[in-house]
Each structure stands twice: as C-alpha cells, then as structure tokens.
Image: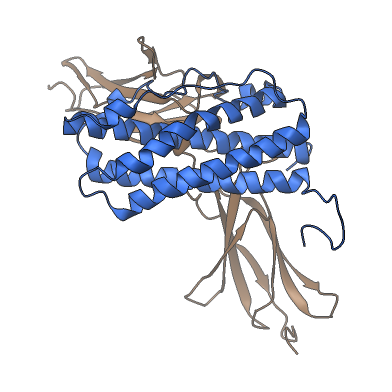
Chain colours: A blue, B brown
Amino acid sequence: PICPNGSISCQVSLGDLFDRAVKLSHYIHSLSSEMFNEFDERYAQGRGFITKAINSCHTSSLTTPEDKEQAQQIHHEDLLNLVMGVLNSWNDPLLHLVSEVQTIKEAPDTILWKAVEIEEQNKRLLEGMEKIVGRLHPGGLGNELYSRWSGLPSLQLPDEDSRLFAFYNLLHCLRRDSHKIDNYLKLLKCRLIHDSNC
Amino acid sequence: GQPPGKPELIKCRSPEKETFSCWWKPVSDGGLPTNYTLFYNNEGEESFYECPDYTTAGPNSCYFDKKHTSLWTIYNITIKATNEMGSNISEPHYVDVTYIVQPNPPVNLSLALNKHTDGKLYLLMNWSSPPLADVRSGWLTLEYELRLKPEEGEEWETIFVGQRTKYKVFSLIPGEKYIAQVRCKSDHGEWSKWSSESYIHLPKEFRLKD
C-alpha cells in the first residue's frame, strides 16, 4: 500500500511522484504523436503544411534547451520552471482543441478521443508537477513562465485549407512540446532521484 | 553527356539523439563524374549551410555532429548534384531529429545457467546498452526486446522486457542448443537491428520444473 496502515502524515515519495509524472508525460507524448500522424495522414497529405509550420508554436518564446549539453547545463530549478511554463501554456489550447476538433469534417472518433484524453492527462500532469515543485521548492520557483495562445480564431476560419493548417500546426506543436516535457522529466528524474545514474 | 538526374534523400537517422546522419541515392550520371552538395537550414533561419562532414557516415552521406545537431527544430535539407553539363537539386526534405532516433543494437549479450534459491535452474540473459547511448543521465530512455529459439527451431519466442538489461528464462528444453538476440528502441523511436547472436547448449539433465 502507498500509505502503511495507521500512519497519519504519510507522503508519497519524491521518487514515486517523478515515476508517475514520467509515466504521464510518456503517455501524453505517445497520444500526441499518434494524433498528429493520424491528422497528417488524413488531412495534410500533399498540402505542404510542414513548410508553413516553421517557427510558429505559441511556446517558442520560452527558450528551452535544444540538445543534451544545454539540458545538462541548466539548473534543475530552471528546467522545472520551463516544464511548468510549457505545461501551463497548453491548458488553454487543449481546452479549445477538444471543442474545435469536433467541427472538423468527418473527424474520426480516435482523434476526438485523443484530444479529450490529452487535455485531461495534461491537467493531471500539471497537478503532479505542482506537488513535485512544492516538495523541492516550498517557496515556489520564482518568476512563472507562460506563453499565451491566440490561435482560437484560426481554428474557426471559414476557409477549409487555412483552418486545417491551423489544426495541423497546433498538433505539430503539441507533439513537439509534449516530447520536450517527456525528455526533460526523464532527465530530471535521473538527476534528482538517481543522482544521474539511471 | 547529360546534366545529372534529380538526387533523392533516402533516410536520416540519429543513433543516440545527439548526432544524426542523412543518406542520398546517387543519380543517373550518364558516365560523367558527379559531385554532390548537401545544403540545410534550421527552422526560423534564412541562411543555408553546407554539410559539415561528408565522410564519417560513409559514401553519399552527411554527418551532423553534436555541435550541428538540435532537437525540436525542423531541418530543411536539399541535395545538389553537379557535373560538367549542369546540376540538379532534390526536393526539400524536412527532418526533426526528435523523430528519427534509431539506436544501434545492444551489445555484450551473455547467456548463463543459474540456480534459483529454490534449486531450479534458469537461463540468465544479460546485455548492455549500445555504446554512445547516454542512458545514465536520462537523456535517452531505451526499451529492450529479446528473442530466443532452439537452433533448429523455426519460431522465435519474443519477449518485451522494458528498460531492464537482464532477464531470467525458465521455460527451456533440456539438451537443446539455443540462439538468442536482443534489440532496443528509444522511448518514442524505432527499433534497432537485432544484436549479433549468442548461443548456449543446455545440458541434458537440465531440470526446469518439478
């Protein structure tokens, strides 16, 4: 049992918190990848969307490590702060994605279901991360990072091609950012729980 | 003679999420010596750069070392083929290193007979992650899959073992000679090739079950 019988102030260990967070981040990225590939196959073939999806994620203002060296040099507090910032920045778009995906012509249930599941799991991961941060830095992490999303109007455009590109771009960015979060959390877990000796 | 045909980029691969290489298919060159140049630029950059290393990954390839490799960004890659009659450029190829990770096979697969505390014998399989794969820091997370079969057998028994690097096998036939292999994949990437084969010949009186 997580909490032995009779114990009052029993806490889940930091290691278990990280295990759960990594399981969730892994799951969220897998879903995001599947959703992107499914959408790409069904709606994006031959439209050249990738050439327009360059440098257009709403979270690109958050400067994140882009290779192993940068990721290992950054202090864990800053990396945690970045993870929180990216997660928080996805709350709003994921909420709208769930409703707007239903307006796509013949959107398969599998895409709808994944949008709902990702939105829920992203919230759970955020809650878990808040516990981890609270455990590691009771006083908080200082300046909270957040990148506002203003893409709702483009998901509602009358022109089909523009609207499909807006969805493509959002799913492309979700796949990318969910991978970043998953990668950083696995790194943090090894660093903080296993002394970089996983 | 003719100008060269249009070159085609075949594959890009990163073995450890720190470097990557791309390969292209040589074109029909009409017998004239043809030279290849790879150009790339990164998402959000205007200028194009030339391949930093045409040799490390073998013929018709470009190798991007750590300094030239970034994740979570799209590389726009084109190949130019040139001969004395003219040149031709490939279609652009868009690559994000994040999604082209295919590790090298695991190494040092060893098979050994061991005795369990309850006296039963089992086969202990042990292996190591591929060299250069940084699993220790958590940058790369690898999962493994084993396969095992009697030497003369047709059917492999395949076992997914997650992130472990050792595994106990109990259900084997005494007196048989077994072949084993292991492969790995990064948490969100492609399976590696299978490792080289390892063998073990079980003694006849190798009693597994009561």
Residue B57 in view: no
Question: Relative to residue A128, is residue B25 drawn left or right?
Answer: left
Front residue (pair B186, B102)? B186
The location of residue B23, given as percent across then percent down, is 37, 33
Locate the N terminus of chain B and report the quarter of the image it occupies.
top left
Q: Left of A161 or right of it: where is B62?
A: right
Residue B31 image offset from top left, x and y in percent:
19, 27
Q: Residue at x 48, y 34 (%)?
A: A91
Tag count: 0
Quarter of the rendering containing residue B75: top left
Residue nearest the observer in this picture, A154 or B81: A154
Residue A81 in picture, x, y percent from top left: 64, 25
Vertical arrangement, residue B123 with respect to residue B74, above or below: below
Q: Is residue B146 depicted above or below A193 in this figure? A: below
Residue B51 seen by the camera: yes
Relative placement, left or right, of A39 versus A61 is: left
Depth check: B196 or A129 in front? A129
- Image point (73%, 83%), residue name: B208
Q: Is residue B116 above or below residue A106?
A: below
Counting from the top left corner in percent of width and height, residue A122 is at 52, 41
> Which residue corresponds to the image point at 22% horizontal and 18% vertical from the top-left?
B83
In the image, residue A185 above or below residue A61: below
